[in-house]
């Protein structure tokens, strides 16, 4: 919204300045045209007839209004109309440079988001493996949607889920993450949006469990 307001303000400012300059120019032109060259009077003394020749003084005394000025042949309405049309085209010119962040026109980009399995040293039951797969799939789906910039890296997250599926704690493990700040925020937001998770199955008789996931963001340009 601020960019659009700036565009319109710029157009209005340009048109107002041009109208002001044209008005000043017209007033100055009228002042110049109202000026007449000083008339020189002289007394002709009788003398011997001499061949007539053009009088330089008479030529200097010509009214400047009789001399056409090709540079002043300006149609003000036509000029303003052209400026208004040019100003209306500014918005289209700005739209040429509007694009999604880091997205290049005419280039096909393929996003890849993966959440590989991280083996747990404490629990290896089939119920845990199945539940962990559900958690990873939901996080991967949200991460793919939130992945809107062409950045690459890995985010390592650790969080706690209660037995009813409620997300309790969430943090980025900085020492194991290689992604930039944008991708780290995408990882955190994706886990939050994926919650609440399904309740624990009966085989997972725990009040809460800690899960670790590694989200890998990659893209290919074609």
Image (cartoon, helix red, strand yellow):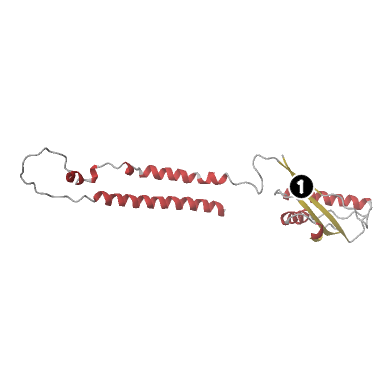
Q: Is residue 128 visible?
A: yes
Q: Is residue 172 visible?
A: no
In this rendering, the answer to whether 54 lies above or below 131 is above
Viewport quadrant of the C terminus: top right
> Could you tell whether 218 is left or right of 37 in the image?
right
Q: Which residue is mark 1?
A: 218
Residue 8, image x and y in percent?
50, 51
Number of marks: 1
Q: Secondary structure at mark 1?
A: strand
Picture residue at 34% right of the left edge, 52% below the top: 24
Residue 60, image x and y in percent?
20, 46
Outermost residue toward the top in this view: 51
In this rendered view, identify the residue nearer to me: 137 or 11: 11
Residue 49, image x and y in percent?
7, 39
Q: Residues within 10 Å of mark 1 (few under 14, many from 20)?
A: some
Picture residue at 81% right of the left edge, 56% below the top: 156
Residue 108, image x and y in percent?
70, 40
> Could you tell whether 12 is left or right of 215 in the image?
left
């Amino acid at each position: 919204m601020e960019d659009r307001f700036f565009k319109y303000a710029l157009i209005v400012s340009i048109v107002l300045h041009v109208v002001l300059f044209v008005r000043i120019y017209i007033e100055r032109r009228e002042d110049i045209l109202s000026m007449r060259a000083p008339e020189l009077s002289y007394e002709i003394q009788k003398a011997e007839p001499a061949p007539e020749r053009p009088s330089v003084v008479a030529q200097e005394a010509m009214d400047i209004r009789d001399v056409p000025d090709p540079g002043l042949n300006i149609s003000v309405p036509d000029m303003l109309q052209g400026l208004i049309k040019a100003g209306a085209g500014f918005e289209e010119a700005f739209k040429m440079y509007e694009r999604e962040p880091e997205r290049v026109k005419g280039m096909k980009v393929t996003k890849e988001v993966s959440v590989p399995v991280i083996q747990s040293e404490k629990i290896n039951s089939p119920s845990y493996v199945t539940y962990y797969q559900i958690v990873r799939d939901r996080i991967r789906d949200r991460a793919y949607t939130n992945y809107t910039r062409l950045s690459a890296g890995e985010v390592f997250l650790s969080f706690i889920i209660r037995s009813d599926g409620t997300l309790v704690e969430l943090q980025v493990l900085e020492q194991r993450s290689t992604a930039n700040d944008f991708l780290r925020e995408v990882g955190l937001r994706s886990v939050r949006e994926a919650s609440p998770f399904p309740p624990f199955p009966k085989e997972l008789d725990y009040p809460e469990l800690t899960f670790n996931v590694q989200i890998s963001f990659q893209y290919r340009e074609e």
